[in-house]
Amino acid sequence: MKDPNQMSFLDHLEELRWHLIRSVISILIFGILAFIFKDFIFNTLLFGPKNSDFITYRWFCDLSQALGQGNSFCIQEMPFRIQSRTMAGQFSAHLWTSILAGFIVSFPYVLFELWKFISPGLNENERKNARGFISIASVLFFIGIFFGYYIITPLSINFLGNYTVSNEIFNDFDLSSYIGFLRASVLSAGLIFELPIIIYFFTRIGIVTPLFLKKNRKFALVILLSLSAIITPPDITSQIIVCIPLLILYEVSILISKIVYKKQQQELSKL
């Protein structure tokens, strides 16, 4: 690898191009595997939340019985069907779902390639402080993915699948609509859970401070509640379930910002 201090702008672009190529190859490899194992991807993962025996629905049923509410939270059936109404609908869904699965699985490697590109431009102290970035960011991303899949998606599908304005109307959801909704729920949760990482870097470059985050906690609460209302069904229980981990993430972000800010002040005092 060339010395980053002696590389021209075009050299940096060439370096970035190869990092992007390797990332895309990784996504394609896992995407091909997902394409091959379509039965597991679709029947088990994608269509799992539309089945009444999905694990999340069983958790809520057990919780309802444990709280003495009987079967009030238990789900007997999902009164809707999924259909494809375009010639290439199923193939298109198969293809793009495989690419998405490839991106999710290869996310740590994509971060690794990103880190390899930006790390030569950092000094030794900055690289030391950012140690563990790939592991922590990957863990947070996958926690968000699981949260979106096991919490946000089932709550939303249960509400929207059972919602009706008239008994004359039967819910027939298009395949692209169903997959698009699930994709948005899962990916948005994965990205939201990267908040501590974002706050870490924002604190490092001076955009935010712990004091700023604390002073604006009430505004953050309103934003998080609004966000919960957007990505969940319009019932207070679902919004609270989703909002609680988001609030925890925000408090963790304040703690991280405080640690980073304190280290920066100590470094400045030594100069």
Image (spheres, grey):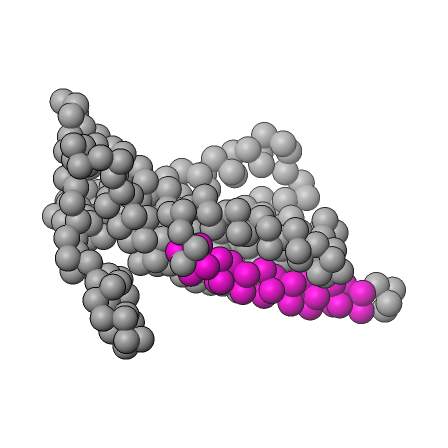
- Residues 150 and 97: in front is 150
Q: Main secondary structure of the magenta part?
A: helix
- Left or right position of 194 against 182: right
Residue 249 point in image, percent of width and height: 54, 61
Residue 68 point in image, percent of width and height: 28, 76
Residue 144 point in image, percent of width and height: 41, 56
- Residues 31 and 20: in front is 31
Q: Is residue 109 above or below residue 63?
A: above
Can you see residue 85?
yes
Q: Is residue 247 above or below residue 40?
A: below
- Boundaries of the magenta span: 238-267
Which residue: 43% across, 55% down?
236
Q: Quadrant of the C terminus?
A: bottom right
Q: Is residue 166 above or below residue 34?
A: above
Q: Magenta segment: does it hold 28?
A: no
- Residues 114 and 85: in front is 85
Which residue: 85% across, 69% down?
270
Q: Is residue 251 above or below residue 193?
A: below
Which residue: 27% across, 71% down?
69
